[in-house]
Image: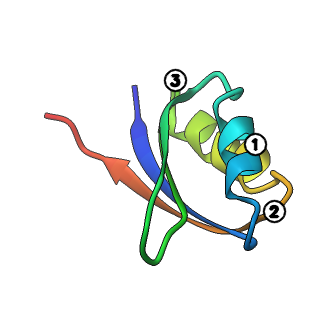
């Protein structure tokens, strides 16, 4: 089951709203505020790489006030 960290930049002042929305998405396991280059970090899990891609592109990137994302796929041995 693929997992990834999604690093998210949001519009200024939109951090609380985006974090609340992320917590409502079923495959988002964890989400946190972050200080630095990215505003929010979310850990996501999906049934397949295709489902992971779909979740990031259609559910996370489409959230109101999300400006950009960077997805880091986790490799588990």
The residue to which callout 2 is attached is 65
Disc 2 to disc 1, how far (Cα)? Answer: 13 Å
In the rendered view, does 56 fall on the left or right side of 17? left
The answer to whether the residues at label 2 and label 3 have Cβ atoms under 8 Å apart is no
Look at mark 1 in the image and give the residue it sits on.
59
Left or right for 3, reference 20: left
Q: Quadrant of the C terminus?
A: top left
Is 48 drawn above or below residue 69 in the view shown? above
> In the rendering, which numbered label is found on residue 4?
none
Circle 1 packing at 10 Å, graded few (<14), some (14-19), many (20+), is few
Q: Residue at x 46, y 78 (%)?
A: 37
| Gap in angstroms between the C-alphas marked 1 and 3 | 15 Å
Classify residue 74 by image quadrant: top left
Q: Nearer the viewer, mark 2 or mark 1?
A: 2
Residue at horizontal 73 percent and vertical 56 percent from the top: 61
Name the residue: 24% across, 44% down. Answer: 75
Q: Nearer the viewer, mark 1 or mark 3?
A: 1
Q: Is residue 53 left or right of residue 41?
A: right
> What x and y, as percent, mark residue 27?
58, 26
Q: Which residue occupies 78% across, 47% down? A: 58
Mark 2, mark 3: which one is toward the viewer?
A: 2
**Residue 30: % across, % down:** 46, 33
Regarding mark 2 in the picture, which secondary structure is present there?
Answer: loop
Near-viewer residue (21 or 55): 21
What mark, if any, has residue 47 been given in the picture?
3
How packed mark 2 is, by other alpha carbons closer than 10 Å (few <14, some 14-19, many 20 or more), is: some
- Local secondary structure at mark 1: helix
- Name of the residue lying farthest toward the bottom: 37
The front one of 24 and 59 is 24
**Where residue 71 appears, x then y in whole percent?**
48, 58
């Amino acid at each position: 089951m693929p997992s990834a960290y999604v690093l998210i930049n949001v519009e200024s002042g939109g951090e609380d709203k985006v974090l609340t929305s992320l917590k409502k998405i079923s495959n988002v396991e964890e989400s946190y505020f972050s200080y630095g280059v990215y505003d929010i970090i979310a850990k996501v899990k999906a049934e397949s790489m295709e489902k992971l891609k779909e979740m990031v592109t259609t559910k996370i990137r489409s959230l109101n006030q999300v400006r950009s994302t960077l997805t880091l796929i986790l490799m588990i041995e």
